[in-house]
Amino acid sequence: MSSPVPTPAAGGRPGEQRSLPVPDGLEGQRVDQALTRLFGLTRAVAADLADTGRVVVDGRARGKGDRLTAGSWLEVELPPPPGDPAPPQPVDGLVVVHDDDDIVVVDKPVGVAAHGSPGWTGPTVTGGLAGAGYRISTSGAAERQGIVHRLDAATTGLMVVAKSERAYTLLKAAFKERTVDKGYHALVQGHPDPSKGTIDAPIDRHPTHDWRFAVVAGGRPSVTHYEVLEAFPAASLVDVHLETGRTHQIRVHFSALKHPCVGDPTYGSDPTLAARLGVSRQWLHAVRLGFAHPADGRWVEFTSEYPADLAGALAVLRAEN
């Protein structure tokens, strides 16, 4: 008779060394998938356990993508229980551009994530707002309350956070229905041809490197509109309008065109150029954000200036031009 797959509640307390035979129901499953089902871990935490050698099957450490065989002896060192969360603190450089009863618009600095997630120990927009006394009262997981869209931690610029339940619902719908104007400036390598165009290419996780994304047949529909604003010998400053909002969309699309964002080695940029320009992260900034205000439907629009590191890189290029 097949052995059932335990529910997360049956997985034991975190912080323990757990040993058990692989249930029949997990035959052929990836290690990270199996740990998620057995112990109620997130996929990211499960993958981290495997990557750091804390998953052993029949005496051998196994990677997150290895497949399990029913009846094999599984040993897992579960993560310790989390301590009491630190009280939220204001975030240096997080500027509130607009605030009212329904929304708060922020200009996000580099190195700040939109919200907390497994493995992220740095500052967040939600934590910074809470630390500064802003009250976000919407449904959803506590660490994601009010979040209706995201920017990568290394991408700077404008974000809107919903403060009320009505604003959260209406803004989520606006992003889904693509009625939000999301404008970015990117410094990309080389010279896109044509200088004004649309990139319509589906995006999904990279087939062999699941920590990044790629243009993949059968991926999620992804549309990026762009126009070159200024051309330099080695790079081009591009205005980008997103029709969709996939993870890493701008970075993936321009990498697929062989014009990656300057300072983005994850997607194939030239480190020599980034070093010459003094750029230590992708040159990508959310310069414009417009939407119908959830309180009364009036159109509101916000803009953001380049932060010092991105402006400095442009100054170098203009001086050389």
Image (cartoon, rainbow, N blue to C red):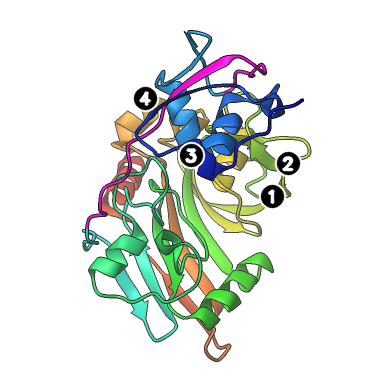
Looking at the image, the residue that sits furthest to the bottom is 296
Q: Tell me how far mark 4 sits from mark 3, CA to CA.
A: 13 Å
Alpha carbon distance from label 2 to label 3: 22 Å
Of residues 36 and 208, the one drawn nearer to the viewer in this rendering: 36
Quarter assignment of residue 285: bottom left
| Residue nearest the viewer, comparing 179 with 310 | 179
Tell me which numbered mark, 4 or 3, is placed earlier along the sequence.
3
Residue at 40% in and 72% down: 105
Q: CA distance from mark 4 to mark 2?
A: 32 Å
Pointer 4 local density, CA inside 10 Å: few below 14, some 14–19, many at least 20: few
In the rendered structure, does residue 77 fall within the stretch colored magenta? Answer: yes
Q: CA distance from mark 1 to mark 4?
A: 30 Å
Task: Tell me the residue that label 4 is attached to.
Answer: 272
Question: Which residue is under mark 3?
Answer: 261
Tag in front: 2 or 1: 2
Which percent across, then down, holds residue 163? 43, 77
Work out whether residue 266 or residue 39 is closer to the camera in this orientation and state it. 39
Q: Circles 2 and 1: CB distance less than 8 Å?
A: yes
The answer to whether residue 38 is above or below residue 139 is above
Mark 4 or mark 2: whose residue is earlier in sequence? 2
Judge left or right: residue 253 versus residue 264: right
Badge 1 is on which residue?
222
Name the residue: 25% across, 75% down: 133
Give the x, y percent position of residue 149.
52, 61
